[in-house]
Amino acid sequence: MSKNSDRHVPDSVLDENNDEIKWEVKPDSMLIQKQEDDVGNDSSATTQGPMIKLIVSYLHGPTRHEVHVPAQSTFGDIKNALAQKTGLEPKDQRLMFRGKEKEDEEHLHMAGVKDRSKILLLEDTASKVRKLEEMRKSDQIAKASEAVAEVRAEVDKISERVAALEVAVDGGTKVEEKEFLVSIELLMKQLLKLDSIEAEGEAKLQRKAEVRRVQKFVEKLDNLKARNSNPYSNSSNSVSVTTKL
């Protein structure tokens, strides 16, 4: 047996830069420098303890979620994990453990959270209000779009009447003035309907486009009426030109 085997080996020494070098002895008595864990590698599961399973349930409702996180994670880490499962943003979540709401930076092990611990999930009140407001707006937009579509269908029918009057005037046929007035009145009624529609977002753009469309038809009818009353018209016969609405 070598005499060196009985020699005392220091646990560490200082190098020329006064940095500590740690040593360890392998089973075959070989002396090597001890390797430190690389803190830069992806070893968060090791540094944060073993993985634990948590049961997260809503305060009101049967839905439950299982979340697997390192034992020394924070409640903020749980929120990030729940966001993927619930679709609820971390800022909109509130977590309760043992009757107390926990802050994002609090660590699980410090709060007494262990494997299979149960945590309650609540949706933030502001988030609920925001969602209700979004639902209200969405419903309002849908109703407004439907109302605009109904007006559009009526205007489509009136446009056929306008087209028939245009053909008559362009052909030199004298049209009774009441035909223009009736058409204009029908269009004005549709403008009033559009004005009464409370719209936001896309529905507001649809309403605006339909208002412009109706106004253009009114302008066209005014122009046709003026041309029809021209005393130099090629025809002196007065006829009634109508379309089925």
Image (cartoon, grey):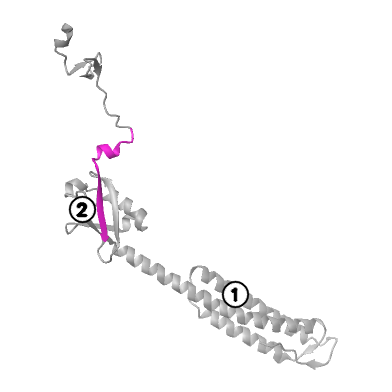
The quadrant where residue 35 appears: top left
**In the rendered image, which quarter contains the C terminus?**
bottom right
Near-viewer residue (130 or 43): 43
Q: Would you say residue 54 sits in the magenta stretch?
A: yes
Tell me: residue 160, above or below residue 58. below
Tell me: residue 131, above or below residue 116. below
The quadrant where residue 244 appears: bottom right
Residue found at x 60% / y 78%: 152
Q: Which residue is mark 1?
A: 210
Residue reaching furthest to the top: 3
Near-viewer residue (56 or 191): 56
Residue 53 vs residue 199: left or right?
Answer: left
Secondary structure beneath label 2:
loop
Q: Which residue is mark 2?
A: 117
Secondary structure beneath label 1:
helix
Q: Amino acid at mark 2?
A: Ser
| CA distance separating discs 1 and 2 | 59 Å
Residue found at x 77% / y 83%: 227
Near-viewer residue (57 or 181): 57
Whole-percent x and y of residue 32? Answer: 25, 17
Give the magenta range.
41-57
